[in-house]
Amino acid sequence: MTQDASLISWDDFKKIEIRKGTIVKAEPFPEARQPAYKIWVDFGAEKGVLKTSAQVTRHYLPEHLPGKAVMGVTNFPKKQIGPLMSEFLLVGFEDESKAIILATCDPQVPDGAILK
């Protein structure tokens, strides 16, 4: 039996820090090339509040995002997105029209918890 080249090992998966956080602030990002928001997420005591940009304007208004329990990859290198330095990757799923729906988490999970 041949191994699928797209498969990753357990050790590969353990390298990825997908953490639960709570959105604390969101605002329009008019400088972005595609419609997007600037989003700040509290990832708990170890990581603190990190910021990113997310193209989630089709399904969300910025004033409705604070308090939402989300998931993000917190061990990518920082990335410059226009005038914003993104500090993590907010994750989500594409709907039928390719618009992003945020991957959410039960609010009972503490901020900073790592997906296992």
Image: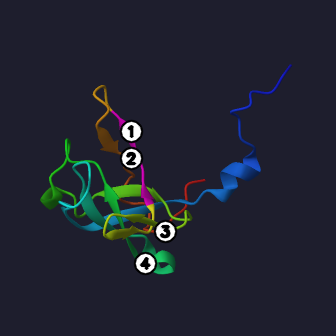
Q: Earlier in the sequence, mark 3 or mark 2?
A: 3
Q: Label 1 amino acid?
A: Phe
Inspect the magenta stretch and tell me whether residue 61 lies in it. Answer: no
Q: Label 3 amino acid?
A: Lys
Q: Earlier in the sequence, mark 2 or mark 1?
A: 1
Evaluate whether residue 41 shows in this view: no
Residue at 74% over, 31% down: 5
Q: Which one is closest to the eye, mark 3 or mark 4?
A: 3
Q: Earlier in the sequence, mark 3 or mark 4?
A: 4
Q: Which one is closest to the eye, mark 3 or mark 2?
A: 3
Give the residues drawn in magenta, as a range: 89-94
Q: Residue 71 falls in which quadrant of the image?
A: bottom left
Q: CA distance from mark 3 to mark 4?
A: 15 Å
Callout 3 touching callout 4 (CB < 8 Å):
no
Q: For the residue labelled by badge 2, is the local secondary structure a helix, a strand or a loop?
A: loop
Residue 17 in the image, given as x and y percentages of width and height: 57, 60
